[in-house]
Amino acid sequence: MRVGIIGAGQLGRMLALAGYPLGLRFEMLDPNPQACGGQVAPLTVAAFDDEAALAALARRVDLVTFEFENVPVATMAFLAGRCPVFPQPAVLEVAQDRLREKECFQELAIPTPAHRPVESRQQLAAAAAELGLPAILKTRRLGYDGKGQAVLRQAADLDAAWAGLGGTPLILEALVPFEREVSMVAVRGRDGGMQFYPLAENSHRQGILRLSRACAADPYQERAEEYTRRVMEKFAYVGVLAFEFFQVGGELVANEIAPRVHNSGHWSIEGAVTSQFENHLRAICGWPLGATTLNGPAAMINFIGELPGTPTLLAIPHLHPHAYGKSSAPGRKVGHATLCLPPGADFDGALRKLREVIGGLD
Ligand code: AMP
């Protein structure tokens, strides 16, 4: 079976690397000729609205998926007219707009921060008065890794935030005083069967995910599974879906969904019986899903900007490095490494050692 992937970043690359042992073949499409997925599969360099290139890809593959959440819905709808596309483009429309996403959570009775749409400076003032401060102003579309956001702590912050973000549809959200940020990665097959990974506990640095730790027997596991099940069933979803939550006051509050494999699930390559990448492919191909259980305590650290030397990483027992084949640049995710220990091992001790060698895990 040949799988087309729209987007050829590290997520596409890791999908292909997981799919070759299953006998799958891949082709990718990305406007960036340097996209790192191109190192592991044939890459068509084309704009996402290049219909001739999209149609040609659809003719060469059996089905298409995407690894880039901001791929235009029109691109996936165009492809869906020519070959099977999973996940269904309808979910992208919701996931790409923070307001529609929150409306969807409310419709499914999933708690989400209080929020207001903002299209003008007057609306911003009214929304801030209604929600109170602190609050967080975000662009409704195309934000990622903390970009397109401003925290408002006092009335004087409104002008600067509006100067930075105004002119595009925005959303103001109450700032949640969360105790933890956790994410659920789950997969739903074409037959409607579902599997859920253990919750990951996430910490960020300058808006970018830094550390994800898989949580065995987390007290919020069941709640997160229930909320994720509601979303996947609403869309008759096929593939891997990630759901980010804030834990606060004994509840999970929904932040956002990502209709794709997710950075907070990278630990599953070594840390789970079946990785999120393999399970996404199993799901979209209509094949049996694999078990999502933990192999042992696991945590993943992202390398942002530049990679530590491979020998440095290889000197740490039970650490598995993944370089993405990208050049160094500030704020760019260039690789990750997963610490995965045998059950019962001293995980905190190993994490401390990792911290000493790599530095600045927090
Ligand atoms: P996002 O792009 O929505 O995932 O936001 C990036 C990060 O900003 C999140 O991981 C949180 O750490 C923080 N954040 C976003 N929205 C809120 C909120 N409503 N309350 C508190 N923190 C938030």
Image (cartoon, grey):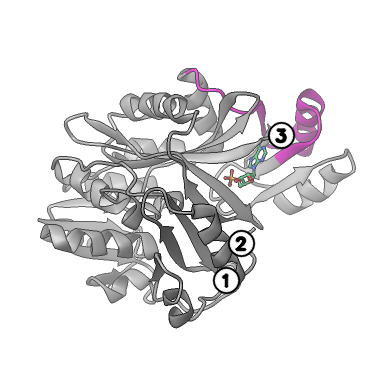
Disc number for residue 361: 2
The x, y position of residue 354, in whole percent, is 54, 66
Q: Are marks 2 and 1 in contact (CB under 8 Å)?
A: yes
Mark 2: amino acid: Leu
Residue 51 visible in image: no
Q: Ligand 1 lies in which image quarter?
A: top right
Secondary element type, mark 2: loop
The x, y position of residue 343, in whole percent, is 37, 49
* Badge 1 or badge 3: first in the primary sequence: 3
Secondary element type, mark 3: loop
The x, y position of residue 197, in whole percent, is 36, 40
Residue 330 visible in image: yes
Residue that numbered label 1 is attached to: 358
Identify the image quadrant of residue 112: top right
Q: What segment is highlighted magenta in the picture?
A: 109-136
The answer to which of 158 and 54 lies nearer the viewer is 158
Residue sitting at x 9%, y 56%? 1
Mark-to-mark CA distance, 1 and 3 = 30 Å
* Badge 2 or badge 3: first in the primary sequence: 3
Left or right side of 39 for 164: right
Residue that numbered label 3 is attached to: 177
Ligand 1 contact, mark 3 (Cβ < 8 Å): yes
Mark 1: amino acid: Ile
Left or right side of 168 for 342: left
Identify the image quadrant of residue 235: top left
Query: Where's the C terminus, which quadrant?
Result: bottom right
Secondary element type, mark 1: helix
Task: Please say if 156 is above or below 333.
Answer: above
